[in-house]
Amino acid sequence: MIHVKKENNLIIIENGQLFSYALDNKSSWELGRPSKDNVPDIKLHSTTISRKHGKFQNMDGIWFYLDYKGKNGTVYNHRHLEAGLNGRIRPVMLDDGDTFVFGGGEEEIINCKTIWGMFVTKSFDDGWRVVDSKGYQKLKFISGEDSITMDSPKKGFVFEKETGIAIYMDDLTYLTGDVEVIGL
């Protein structure tokens, strides 16, 4: 039996590793590259990440992302985040399924130097599985009676159903809940 809990989470994939952060455990989460003088809540180790890259903040029960305009920027839902008026930090209200690419400049480039993230409003009790998806031209994502076949999906493709999520990252696909992937 699959148990889906309603809670706010941030999924981060960096260098082939998936990390999940239960955002509701704190009201504010600093994100950045750790150093001797900087210990962020969400530690990202790529050199394209600024020491103080951004922050996830709960304001009156609503989650926001505040980008600190680091050198290599943030792409949010396929668009580069820009500063507000006079260079001010402009909070972005988050919604279930919002995606991020941290440290990729103005383009949504997902590679070994960038970090991919997704804000979700649920968590799954059964944890995450990793499937080798290297070398397949087509992949079939399945959840119960629902399925979709993709020709050469892009890195960062998400197949999400009420009972599970699949995140395709080229060589690896991350799965949780009642979702499977088959290489064709």
Image: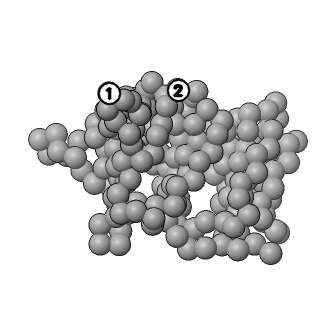
Secondary structure under the numbered disc 1 in the rendered image: loop
Nearest the eye: 82 or 129: 129
Q: Which quarter of the figure has residue 39?
A: top left
Q: Position of residue 96 (x, y in %)?
A: 50, 63
Where residue 71 is drawn, which disc sits there? 1
Q: Which three-letter amino acid code belongs to the residue tagged 1? A: Lys
Q: Position of residue 167 (x, y in %)?
A: 66, 48
Crowding near the residue tagged with mark 1, few <14, some 14–19, many ≥20 C-alpha atoms within 10 Å: few
Residue 98 spot, x, y in % from top left: 48, 55
* Residue 156 visible, this angle: no
Residue toward you, 56 or 137:
56
Look at label 2 and name its amino acid. Lys
Q: Residue at x 36, y 63 (%)?
A: 27
Q: Are marks 2 and 1 in contact (CB under 8 Å)?
A: no
Residue 173 location, quadrant: top right
**SS at circle 2:** loop
* Residue at 85% in and 42% down: 183
Instruction: State which tag comes first along the sequence, 2 or 1.
Output: 1
Mark 2 and mark 1: Cα distance apart in space: 14 Å
Is residue 93 shown left or right of residue 83?
right
Residue marked by disc 2: 113
Which residue is the extreme one toward the left? 86
Taking the image as drawn, is residue 84 in sight? yes
- Quadrant of the image containing the N terminus: bottom right
Q: Residue at x 38, y 53 (%)?
A: 29
- Residue drawn at x 70%, y 35% is 170
